[in-house]
Amino acid sequence: MSVTLGEEIMLLSLDDASGVAKDRSSAGWAVAGGTLLELAMRYRVRVAGGVVSITDTSTTRVPLLDDRLERLTEWAGRRGGGKITDWLARDQATAVRATVASLCDRGLVIEERHRALGIFPVRRYPEADGGVERELRDRLARVVVEGSRPDDRTSALVALLHGARLHGIAFPELPRKEVEPRMATIAEGKWVADSVRRAIRDMQATMAAITATTVVVALS
């Protein structure tokens, strides 16, 4: 089953048993960033110099991506583009909800609802079909731990995880110092085409800046 970059990050974030998202804030930004980068890699948008612009509004044949593209076109189309950070700030929460809904529709997670303290509604998304996530983690292990050559999509995924400092959700059983150097090398994108590399670097820099700001705010 083919899943998007944003869905891959969401799968890594959601705890298989409890359905609770780990590193929720950083993962949320990375999910939104992954969806935007996916559109860039499919040549529907251009990501360069911290700005996103629309290049093609034709269908991707992926409902999740088509919905984000439609919203992005409405937001940025009239002005010819906009700052990546502005779009992610606007779209982050919606993108996460849409991504989780897509995972439910695909049968990869299930939605469970209950009330905390009998009052506050809580939704969790435990694993329903672990095959896609196992393949995903195996692929990450091959390129990061074993040193295999990554493809474009894996390079993009690693760059997003590295930029958002999500090493822990990708490799929960390994010390960060063992995976960070290799992830940083992959994030440079030397294996991919120039246009993809520029988009990856731009999104990685954006994720790093957003995550740093989130950490500062949390500690304030």
Image (spheres, grey):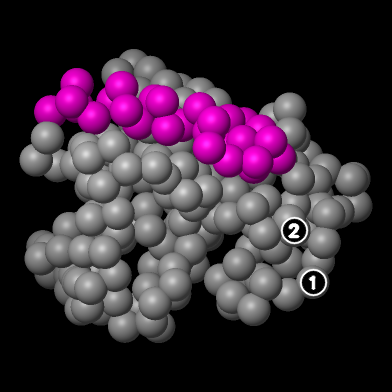
Could you tell me which quadrant the N terminus lies in? Answer: bottom left
Residue that label 1 marks = 58
* Residue 22: image location, x then y, percent: 23, 47
- Specify whether 45 is left or right of 186: right
10 in relation to 185, above or below = below
User: Which tag, 2 or 1, sits closer to the chain's start?
Assistant: 2
180 in relation to 41, above or below = above
Residue that label 2 marks = 44
- Secondary structure beneath disc 1? loop
Any magenta on residue 111?
no
Between 219 and 198, the residue placed more toward the observer is 198
- Specify whether 103 is left or right of 59: left
Could you tell me which quadrant the C terminus lies in? Answer: top left
Between the residue at mark 2 and the residue at mark 1, the CA separation in whole angstroms equals 8 Å
Q: Tell me the amino acid under the disc marked 1.
A: Ser
Question: Residue 15's quadrant in the figure?
Answer: bottom left
Q: Tell me the amino acid under the disc marked 2.
A: Arg
- Specify whether 219 is left or right of 72: left
* Residue 180: image location, x then y, percent: 28, 26
- Secondary structure beneath disc 2? loop
Q: In the drawing, what numbered circle is on residue 28?
A: none
Q: Residue at x 38, y 81 (%)?
A: 106
Kindly tell me whether residue 69 is visible in this rendering: yes
Q: Residue at x 52, y 59 (%)?
A: 95
- Magenta highlight range: 175-203
Any magenta on residue 202?
yes
